[in-house]
Image (spheres, grey):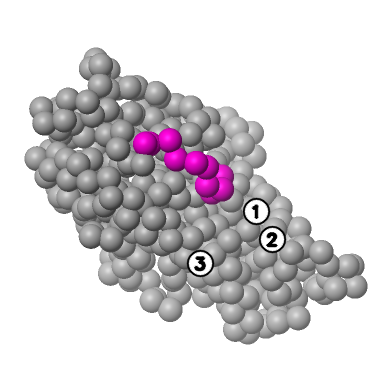
Amino acid sequence: MQTSEGATQERVEPQGSGTHSPADAPKGPRKIAFIKRGLFSYSNPRTGEQLRRTFPGYEVEELDVLEDILKKNKHVVAINLLCIVLRYWRELLSRRQTFRSCFYRTPYIFRKIRQLVRARLEPKKHEYAFSIQTQSLYDASIPGLTHFVYTDHAHLTNLQYPGFSRSELFSRAWIDLEAEVYRHADHVFVMSEHVRKSLIDLYGCDPDKSSCIFAGSNIDPTPIPLENNDYQNQTVIFVGLYWERKGGPELCEAFQRVLAKMPNARLVIVGSSPEIRNPQIEIVGKVPREEVKRRLAQASVFCMPTRVEPFGIAVVEAFLHKLPVITTNIGAMPGLVHPGKTGILVPPEDPSALAAAMLELLGDPAKCRQYGEQGRELVQELYSWDETGKKLHAQIVATLQSTPRP
């Protein structure tokens, strides 16, 4: 366990709106080191907003592993590409993995990121009340500074998914380093309970040192009028960037069965651009977030038969637009979708069950409306960034206050 330099009760402001005068500002370290990588499905901007909102007396200093570290050390990137080939050449040749999926999974890049982050932050660690990183692809902890991790997944969580083989795991050496991320953290925040369970069961993490704080929508949660003819337009929408991983091929196979009984049904695919030619299937592809919102409002049913799902922000966004959800009974989905109340869960890679679920909802607009309204209530209660921010703030304050002074 790490110690915190001067992290005492009087140095942590209570939650507020950010309208504090200089006299109200805490004494001691007044910065938060926020280490991130890219947008993280737009969760990084939201996390930064919550840190600023709930710790208004502090300056949130952001460090982007990609933009501020790797792109300024191109020789590290070049060496890592060689390391990927040497360690994962079999997986690359068989196309089980790609250079992109392997990039952050070599011991070399893991250690280099840790070294370079520490070189940036350690000389001025006395300025920080604590540090927090999103994702667990790197270790941004600094010895002597209280550190937090907020992630949506752990690599060994994949073992919980049906059909996943241990042979598909990345190298043991990298997994051992990933485990250090959790051991070096004073507390680990996750987006779903099934990931927290894997941290406890598969990584040996202390249950008291982790908590589920969920996440919120990455599009504007303000409701807009539905344009689905009161759930009678027989339109199914899929939203996802990763077509195969999100179960797109099974969805298309199932939709063909739906068309045999409902020839006027429509499927709208947002985020992905598979090569499909069918007059009843519209391929929208990648669009701005506001366009995603408009498309959701025009559908009657949301369907994403995912094969792997760490959290499911797309499902949260569907609920915000009062859509009933059809998805698979794996990963975070059973904790998010309540059968008979907000949607239907089906086994993964089961087009027959998927088609039956779509026919059930498309043929019952009243049920769609009921599920959609209850889904929105659920999201408003548990899955908003403000709620996540409150949980994040409360646990950080509790951890800082319980950490003994050096």
Q: Earlier in the sequence, mark 3 or mark 2?
A: 2
22 in relation to 105, above or below: below
Q: Is residue 264 left or right of residue 209?
A: left
Q: CB atoms at circles 1 and 2 under 8 Å apart?
A: yes
Task: Classify the position of the C terminus by image quarter.
Answer: bottom right
Q: Is residue 244 left or right of residue 189?
A: left
Instruction: Give the x, y percent position of residue 95.
Output: 24, 28
Label 1 sits on residue: 49
Residue 277, image quadrant: top left
Q: Earlier in the sequence, mark 3 or mark 1?
A: 1
Viewer-proximal residue among 223 and 306: 223
Label 2 sits on residue: 53
Q: Helix or strand or loop: what does disc 1 sit on? A: helix
Residue appearing at x 48%, y 34% in the figure:
294
Q: Helix or strand or loop: what does disc 2 sit on? A: helix
Q: Is residue 235 left or right of residue 41?
A: left
Q: Dot 1 surroundings within 10 Å: few (below 14), some, or many (20 or more)?
A: some
Residue appearing at x 55%, y 57% in the figure:
385
Cα distance in 3D space between marks 1 and 2: 6 Å
The kind of residue tagged 1 is Glu
Residue 335, image quadrant: bottom left
57 in the magenta segment: no
Stretch in magenta: 219-229
Q: Is residue 156 visible?
A: no
Viewer-proximal residue among 378 and 212: 378
Residue appearing at x 27%, y 34% in the figure:
234
Q: Is residue 406 visible?
A: yes
Viewer-proximal residue among 245 and 361: 361
Q: Which mark is residue 185?
A: 3
Cα distance in 3D space between marks 3 and 1: 22 Å
104 in relation to 379, above or below: above
The kind of residue tagged 3 is Ala
